[in-house]
Amino acid sequence: MVRAILAQLIAAIALAAGTYILARFGHIQIQIAILIPAQGLLAAALGTGFGLARWWLPLQALFPAAIAAALALGLPSWLYLTAFSVLILIYWNAAGERVPLYLSNQKTCRALEALLPAGRSFTFIDMGCGLGAVLTRLAHQPRGRFVGIETAPLPFMVSWLRAKLLGQGRVSVHRANLWDQDFGAFDVVYCFLSPAPMPALFEKARAEMKPGSLLISNSFTVPDHPADEILNLDDRRATQLHLWRF
Ligand SMILES: C[S@@+](CC[C@H](N)C(=O)[O-])C[C@H]1O[C@@H](n2cnc3c(N)ncnc32)[C@H](O)[C@@H]1O
């Protein structure tokens, strides 16, 4: 995020300087219709140089045009502040943890259900439970106790409420950080995060999880620690569940 902002700032300064020099010494006026895409392309190129992930580049390229379009609409400024605040409350972990919000689908929940311990009581945790749907979809399992933790304020509120309304008394959701959580208290640990936290998360799981417990990562694997088993779900996303048995 900081690198993306820096790229936009440097591009703006470079273009402002270039425009000034051309106007002052060459008497050439550059049209705004050229400056806006030039700003986007230069920021995207600088972003590449700063090592931004590839998905940032179209965002960088289109950002100045989006700002120009928003200004042209003349909407009141409180609207932008409100939209920005709501996005922060939802995507709380996107910048710091590099984990945005996206949701496990029904097929994944059915696959998770088949992985739950059979014939005995068990505990399950969703590390970063988002809107809580995984937990409430599994809650009909009578032997399970299902826990969700979430730090993003709006998703936490939704999942907490959902647990109260649909959790059948078996789901609890807490506003807590997964790095402060004792993984050893659970038989099944589920996470659907991003590549960024996976190496540290795996080390934490390996140090804390008890013998016989199961770590499941939706989509994201751990470099140098291949999963004991990979389940390929036949869904549109081609979801893979990575399973480590401790
Ligand atoms: C990709 S979503 C997955 C949501 C849900 N587990 C699901 O499968 O539908 C990841 C969630 O993890 C949360 N998260 C990221 N880092 C976290 C942390 N350190 N502690 C708690 N929650 C975290 C994010 O806010 C986000 O809601």
Image (cartoon, grey):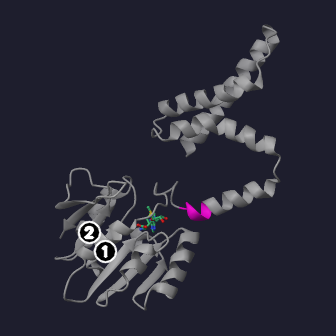
Q: Is residue 19 left or right of residue 200?
A: right
Kind of residue sitting beneath label 2:
Leu
Q: Which residue is mark 1?
A: 183
User: Viewer-nearest of labels 1 and 2?
Assistant: 2
Residue plotted at (62% across, 36% down): 62
Q: Is residue 52 above or below residue 206?
A: above
Q: Is residue 189 depicted above or below 6 in this figure?
A: below
Mark 1 closeness class: few <14, some 14–19, many ≥20 residues within 10 Å = many
- 10 Å neighbourhood of mark 2: few (<14), some, or many (≥20)? many
Three-letter amino acid code of the residue under disc 1: Phe
Closest to the observer, 208 or 42 = 42
Taken as a whole, is the magenta stretch helix, strand or loop? helix
Identified at 52% across, 34% down, the residue is 47
Asked if the residue at tag 2 contacts the one at tag 1, i.e. Cβ–Cβ closer than 8 Å, the answer is yes
Give above or below for 113 relative to 48. below
Q: Which residues are magenta?
A: 88-92
- Report the Cα–Cα distance between label 1 and label 2: 9 Å
Q: Residue at x 40, y 65 (%)?
A: 104
Looking at marks 1 and 2 on the same chain, the residue that comes earlier in the sequence is marked by 1
User: Residue placed at 80% from the left, 40% from the top?
Assistant: 72
SS class, disc 1: helix
Residue 24 screen position, x and y as percent? 81, 13
Magenta region includes residue 212: no
- State ligand 1's quadrant: bottom left
Quarter of the image for residue 154 reads bottom right
Q: Quadrant of residue 9?
A: top right
From the top left corner, tell me how far across and down residue 94 is, in percent.
51, 56
Q: Secondary structure at mark 2?
A: strand
Assess mark 2: CB under 8 A from ligand 1? no
Q: Which residue carries the number 2 mark?
A: 215
